[in-house]
Image (cartoon, rainbow, N blue to C red):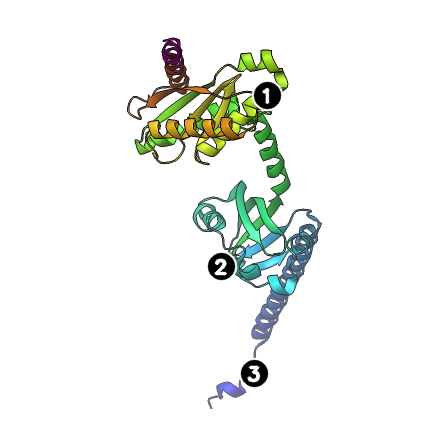
Amino acid sequence: MAVDDKNRTASPLDLAELRLRVAELEQIEGSLRLAEERALDALRYAEDILQTVHEPLLVLDSDLRVRSANRSFFDTFRRTPTETIGCHLYELGGREWDVPRLRTLLEDILPENARLADFEVEADFRDIGHKVMLLNAARVERRGIAPTTILLAIEDVTERKRAEQDLLAVAITDGLTGLYNRRGLFVLASKVLERLRRERVGCRLLFIDLDDLKGINDRLGHSQGDRALIDAADILRRTFRESDIVARYGGDEFVVVPAGAPGDDPQAVIARLTAAIAAHNRDGGRPYALSVSVGSADWDPVVALSFERLIAEGDASMYREKRRRRRESAQ
């Protein structure tokens, strides 16, 4: 008589195989439990390291949501964990972090690079004001375990940048008049001329000499000579546009390079300068009268003379004008 399968007694071989399978499953379960414990330990270790980093640090997922942040981040940007963890980076602090340079880093550059160092970003924050930050970013791939993680280290270099700008301002500024000095003139003018060359726009440099400064020094003393230079610089500053480069080239010589779009006719500018000097002589109450000789040199973006050559042509033009005026006054 046939025996029903449900009632069939398992053979010793079947029981042995079953026990082997159970043992294998228990071993796998133990390995998974051990791996999980090790992963948690590694996560806790990484979190401890994260908290000891002095610079603000964010851990983002591939969707740019904040997975973790260290204490320095919360202290620096005056945010709480509740306001931060789980939020999209661009939504933090009323969208304070939604700035174009940061988007460029995270969305355009970093996807093509595993790491990126010292990427400069500026942003305005409601509670701490304007900040200049150097961002060091790394994209970490965790193969088959979790999606991409992005580490974002933030270095606040606002004060350092301000100090650098102050030092640069001192280096390129004339101490007496407050105008650009010769170094500042060459640095800034070269950038302006390069831009004008790309835009195929010409300009006209003015070379200005303060007449009879030696006579003022000899008759009234060097303190009055310095006062005359300061007065001339103030007049130049008021006469030309804020965007123009106005510099003390040296001694009693000044140079003006238009930095913006072409503006007034050069002769109209010179007439305005002459009128401003006449007004100063009339109302200034100084023991001297100011006068200037003005030369000019045209810069063509096609020919693109060097700035040194442009200066030389402006200087020569100024001396021709000075000689012409002397001849007229002698007649």
* Nearer to the camera, 130 or 132: 130
SS assignment at label 2: loop
The residue to which callout 3 is attached is: 9
- The kind of residue tagged 1 is Asp
The residue to which callout 1 is attached is: 226
> Which of disc 2 and disc 3 is earlier in sequence?
3
Write the start and end of the magenta stretch as one range.
322-331
- The kind of residue tagged 3 is Thr
- The kind of residue tagged 2 is Asp
In the displayed structure, 121 sits above or below 29; it is above
- Whether residues under marks 1 and 2 lie with C-beta atoms below 8 angstroms apart, the answer is no
The residue to which callout 2 is attached is: 63
Instruction: Kindly report which numbered mark, 1 or 3, lies closer to the viewer in this rendering.
Output: 1
SS assignment at label 1: helix
Left or right: residue 316 versus residue 150 is: left
SS assignment at label 3: loop
What is the CA distance from the residue labelled 1 to the residue labelled 2? 62 Å
Q: Which residue is at a point 45% across and 30% down the rendered structure image?
A: 276
> Which of disc 3 and disc 1 is earlier in sequence?
3
Residue 146 seen: no
> Which of disc 2 and disc 1 is earlier in sequence?
2
What is the CA distance from the residue labelled 3 to the residue labelled 2? 57 Å
Instruction: Kindly report which numbered mark, 3 or 2, lies closer to the viewer in this rendering.
Output: 2
Q: Which residue is at a point 53% across and 61% down the rendered structure image?
A: 91
* Nearer to the camera, 188 or 229: 229
Q: Residues within 10 Å of mark 3 (few under 14, many from 20)?
A: few
* Residue 140 horizontal/vertical position (percent): 54, 50
Q: Which residue is at a point 57% across and 70% down the rendered structure image?
A: 17
Please tell me whether residue 330 belongs to the stretch shown in magenta. Answer: yes
Instruction: Kindly report which numbered mark, 1 or 2, lies closer to the viewer in this rendering.
Output: 1
Q: Which residue is at a point 52% across and 42% down the rendered structure image?
A: 116
- The majority secondary structure of the magenta stretch comes to helix
